[in-house]
Image (tube, rainbow, N blue to C red):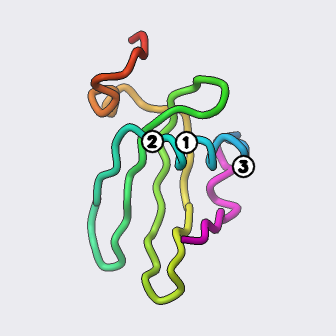
Amino acid sequence: MEIIVLDSAYKHGVSRQSIYSCLFNFRSDLVLDDPPPKRLFVGFDHLGNALEIIAIEDIECDCLVVIHAMKLRKQFYHLLEGSNYEL
């Protein structure tokens, strides 16, 4: 599946490398709503920073369009259960 990162995903200063790292090593993947299905990915980047990423799954082009990326907010910490993340 191809990953497309829109400019809006960089609004909070998360780099392309961090976004990809989190997507390839996520801890949680939740469907937020549809259509189109938006997915919340929670995980860590290559530096160990906890991130939240929102992407739209486009089935027609078999791609994931990342629209949002930022440091993980406290309301989503529970999605890191089973990790060694220090709260």
Mark on residue 26?
2
Magenta-span inclusion, residue 7: yes
Q: Position of residue 10 (x, y in %)?
A: 68, 50
Mark 2 to mark 1 CA distance (whole Å): 5 Å
Work out whether 9 lies above or below 21: below
Number of residues whose C-alpha sits closer than 10 Å to that of mark 1, classed few (under 14), some (14–19) or many (20 or more):
many
Which region shows up in magenta? 1-12
Q: Of callouts 1 and 3, which one flags the residue occurring earlier in the amino acid sequence?
A: 3
Circle on res. 16: 3
How much space separates mark 1 and mark 3, taking CA atoms? 10 Å
In the rendered structure, are the residues bearing label 1 and label 3 in contact, judged by CB atoms less than 8 Å apart?
A: no
Whether residue 65 appears in magenta in the rendering, the answer is no
- The amino acid type, in three-letter code, at marker 3 is Arg
Amino acid, disc 1: Cys
Q: Is residue 46 above or below residue 84?
A: below
Residue 42 in which image quadrant: top left
Image coords of residue 75 (percent x, y): 31, 31
